[in-house]
Each structure stands twice: as C-alpha cells, then as structure tokens.
Image: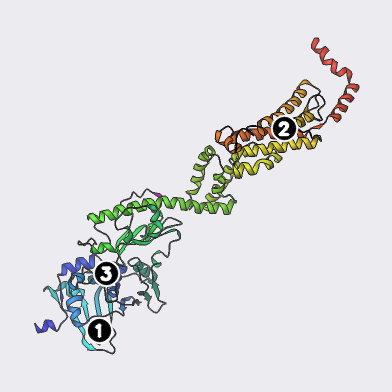
Amino acid sequence: MEEKENSFVMSFDPKTIQHLGIRMYSTLPPVIAELIANSYDADAENVSITLLDSNGKKEIIIEDDGMGMTFTELNNKFLRIGRNRRDEEGLQETPKGRKIIGKKGLGKLSFFGVAHKVEIDTKKNGRRNAFVMDWEDIKNSIKPEYTPEAIRKDERCAGKEGGTKISLKDIKRETEFNAENIAEGISKHFIVDPDFKIIVKLNDEEPIIVDNEKKYSNLDKQIEWKIPEDIEEFGLDYENKDKIKGYLFTTVLPISPKTNMKGITLFSRKKLVNVPEYFGNSESSHIFSYLTGWLEVDFIDDLDEDVIATNRQSLNWNHPEMLKLKNYLSTLINKLNRDWSLKRGEIRKEKILESTGININDWTSKLPKEVKENVDPIINLVLRNVESTEETKDIHNKLIKYTRSIAPEYTYWHYRNLHPEVKNWAEEDYKDKKDYYEATEKASKAYIRKVKDKAGVDRSSEGGNIDEAFKIDGGILRVTSCNTETEKGIQRGQHSLSKGLVAGCRNPLVHEFPNWERNLGETGLFKEQDCLDMLSLISHLSRRVDNSTFREEVTSSESSATDEQPQSQAQPENDNQA
C-alpha cells in the first residue's frame, strides 16, 4: 500500500489504450489538439508546440503556463483513464471562467497514437513532478496497472508558478515535420480565444501563431455571414438558434477536397465536435463546392446524454435534440444557398460594370416586362459563372453587350427611332415621370410651334395655324411638290394629321373635370403604347416639316417646269390610249 501511494500509477487495460490511443489518433494535429485542450482547461495563457527534427530523430514538446499538477493530482486525475472531470468535481468552468473542454478522460491517451515514449514534467505550488511512460512496457504489462518511470517526485522548485511540459519521444514517422501544415491542422480543432495563445515552432525557426484565420488561410473568401446577425432575415425557427454563433463564408473558386474544409464545422466549448459537413443535404447544389466556416454549439455539452463521439469528430445525430439541430442546419444551408446566389450575382454585375460600363440593374429595370422576361435568363446564365476563366468572362461580357444592343433601356422607345427633336420634347416625361399623356402633349405642342415658326403664321387658334401652313390651296408650306395626285394626297395627309394632333393631343377632357390629366391615366384611355404611337406620328410629321419648302418656291418651280416641257406631260396619255 505504501509503495503504491509513493509511486505514479496508471490503471488501465492495455487493449483500451491501444484502441483509444493508437487506433483513434494516428496523425499529429488531433494528438496535439488533445494536449492543447488540457492546457486550456488548466487556464494556461500560452502553449507552445516545439517540433524537433534533426538527423532523423524527432520529438514534439508541448509546454504551457497553466496551473500544473501536484503528485496527488497526477495520480488521481491525470493517470486515471476514463475519469469524467465535470461529474467528479461538479464543475463546468475553470477558475478563470472558461467552459471546461475535457469530459471523458480519454484524450490523454492520444499521444500513444504517434509516440512510443511520453515524458510528463509539471510543477505546482513550488513542487515539481516528472515521469516517463513507455508504450512497449504498457502493452507488455500483465497487471491491470502500470507504474511509469519516475524522474522527479515532489521536488522543490523556485517560484509558485505552475505549468506542464509534455514531450513526445520515439516518434515513428518518416516524413519531415512541416510546421505550417501542423499549425493549420491544429487550428482546425479550435476556436482560439484572444486570451489563449498557441504557437508552433520547428527547431530554431520563427514561431507560427495559431489563430482562427489559420484554418482558412489558403481560401479566397468572397461572401461572408456572421452568425446569428446576418441570418436574422431568414426567419428560421429553432429553439436554440440564438445560442448558435459563428462565421460562415463562400470562396471565389471551388474548395479543393484535399483541404477537408468543404462544409460547416461544429465546435463546442472552443473545440471541434463535428468535422465539416452539410447535414443531410444533397450535395448536388452548387454552393457545396464553395461553402465553409464554423459554428459554436456549446449547448450540446449541457445535455444529459453525451452526444459527442470519443474522437470528437462527429455527433450522435440519432439523438432527438441532435436531430432538431441537424434539421435547422440543413434549412440554414438552403437559405444560405439562395442568399449566396443573389449576392454572388451582384458581385458579377459589378465586374461586368467595370468591364463593359453596363449597369445591369439599371438597364433591366427600364425594360418592358415582356422584354425583361426574355432577357433575364440570358443574364442569369452569365451571372452564375462567377469563377469562369478570363476567356469565358470575355465571351459573357460580349453576350451582355449584344443583348443590351438588341434590348436597350426603354426598348420600345428605342425601337421607334423617334425624331431627335421629338425625343427631346418627350423624354423626361416618358422616362422619368412615366407621364405618357404629358409626354405626348408636350411633343404635340412643340410640333405645332415648329410649324408656326417655319411657316411664320400666328393665328388665334392652333387649327387655324395648321390650315395656314398646310392647306392644299394657298398653304405656305409644301411637304411635296404637289404635282401629282399622290403628292397632293400626301400634302392633304400632312394637313389632316397635323390637325388631328390638335384634336387628339391638345383638347381631350380639358374642361371635363378637375385633375383631368391624372384621371385620364386612371381611365386607361391613354397608356404607354398610345404615347409611343402618337410620338411616332409626330416624328413622321416633324421629318416632313424638316424637308418642306415654301409654296412660292414650289409654284415657281412648277411654272418653270410647265413652260419648258408642255409636250412631255401629254405624251403618256397618248401612249395609254394607244
């Protein structure tokens, strides 16, 4: 009994150690992560991982400035396999207020997954203890207990500071240590608090700080969501949704499967509990190649049943509470997918604006509904290809340019090929105010004024001015030479259509009731199509006026032509008779 009380003793079953240590932990980051978690629970502020690799000999040293352990604590706590710290001590937090990570008492076996010898050196309350554990001795032990080789036992040491140093020796690993890769691997196992510093150093090289960005350092972020702030508008219903916080994002290019970062990682009490996944969603959706990030779900540690797998790689999704969580996360991803598509499209629009000068939102907002319905599928096809090659992007930019040239803003206005002056007269009311009657009325007024100015007439009535300008007998302006019946018909048409503008655009409903312009729009008697039809007519009439001549000039020309060629006009008649 005395010998046992004065020795370091591990109680174990060698098969248990082999299963929970060697078989569950075969790579460095998970092993080191378990030891870092112990440092966190010991209220350490700093933990360093030193990778020693020289002449084929490898060693890993994990050292912290935490509380350390006494001889009794080493025996009763550290060396007891399967000890549930939270139940035994009745505590959920450390003296500094950290939520305790350790629970199963199995993480300490992880070091046997990579090292055959482990040295523990710890100090607390001015006392220092150290011992070595050898896997071969443990494996060959007959008794259900193992006595590690003691190096120091309750030796006095300077100062009262605590701390623990764990050295992993006799590492069976042929490949060289890569500090950057190991630091990145460690980062994937933690949400690192600001008051907990983790550094990794290879031999005498510069140390690498492990932070929350390290796990995503090789990914080019594009769209980001802070949880829960940026998803409140999704309207998700889940009793624990306010307890979930984190950071999700999508990348510019698809995430390589080699990164093992495709999907959302779950953490509880700052440590990994579920590797990245999509929680039952079919991975056919486009977003699954781009979505990653992390969420903290600390509330799962407060459940009566332990739902975290021993290796902390997955959760028990068959548990009723975990099934609710899974359904919520699945719905969240679906919402993110829709939001991602919209935001991703806006980013592509900005790139198109930079490359082509075309503001897609502004352009399409000014398209008629039936035109927009045909243009939108073309645009959406382009917007989905955010990660296209430069050659493909160039093709897509040209596609946008060509589509806009076919269906520009105010497409029907564009198709009318209106007279430049008519455009100027009506554009503001048509485009900005969408006051179609006002646009037509202003254009008709301007046209009549144009006729008056060119003809030089100023009758008291607009109809009178039109008569003076265009009547077939004595009108001042001639839009044709009026030599033939066809030419005279065109002249009469100019006269009649111009007078029609007065009746159709200047006089309707003027004195019928108050607010007649607004009420005219409400009646549906004058719509956009009516406006465009009338503007086309005014454009036609305006072009005739542009090319018109004065009657005196035409009459003089007619007389000259008659005097010089009297026989030529009669000849066709004789030919017809023949």
Q: Quadrant of residue 427?
A: top right
Q: Quick check: 346 left or right of 287?
A: right
Along the viewing direction, whichever of 222 and 399 lies nearer the viewer = 222
Q: CA distance from mark 1 to mark 3?
A: 21 Å
Quarter of the image that includes the C terminus = top right
- Disc on the earlier residue, 1 or 3: 3
Residue 72 is at least partly visible in this image? yes
Residue 408 visible, this orientation: no
Q: Which residue is mark 3?
A: 101
Q: What are the residue bounds of the magenta stretch? A: 282-288
**The disc label shown at residue 89, or none:** none
For the residue pair 72 and 511, the one nearer the viewer reads as 511
What amino acid is found at the position of numbered circle 3 in the picture?
Ile
Identify the secondary structure beneath mark 3: loop
Specify whether 514 is left or right of 313: right
First reached walking from the N terminus: tag 3 or tag 2: 3
Residue 296: x %, y % from top left: 32, 63
Q: State which mark lies toward you, 2 or 1.
A: 2
Which secondary structure, mark 1?
A: strand
Mark 1–mark 3 CB contact (< 8 Å): no
Locate residue 350 relative to residue 306 in the image: left or right.
Answer: right
Residue placed furthest toward the top: 578
Instruction: Say which amino acid is labelled 1.
Output: Lys
User: Circle 2: is it few (<14), some (14-19), or many (20+) Cα within 10 Å?
Assistant: many
Disc 1: which residue: 124
Please tell me whether residue 63 is drawn above or below residue 267 in the rendered image. below
Which numbered disc covers residue 541? 2
Residue 386 appears at what percent x and percent y? 48, 52
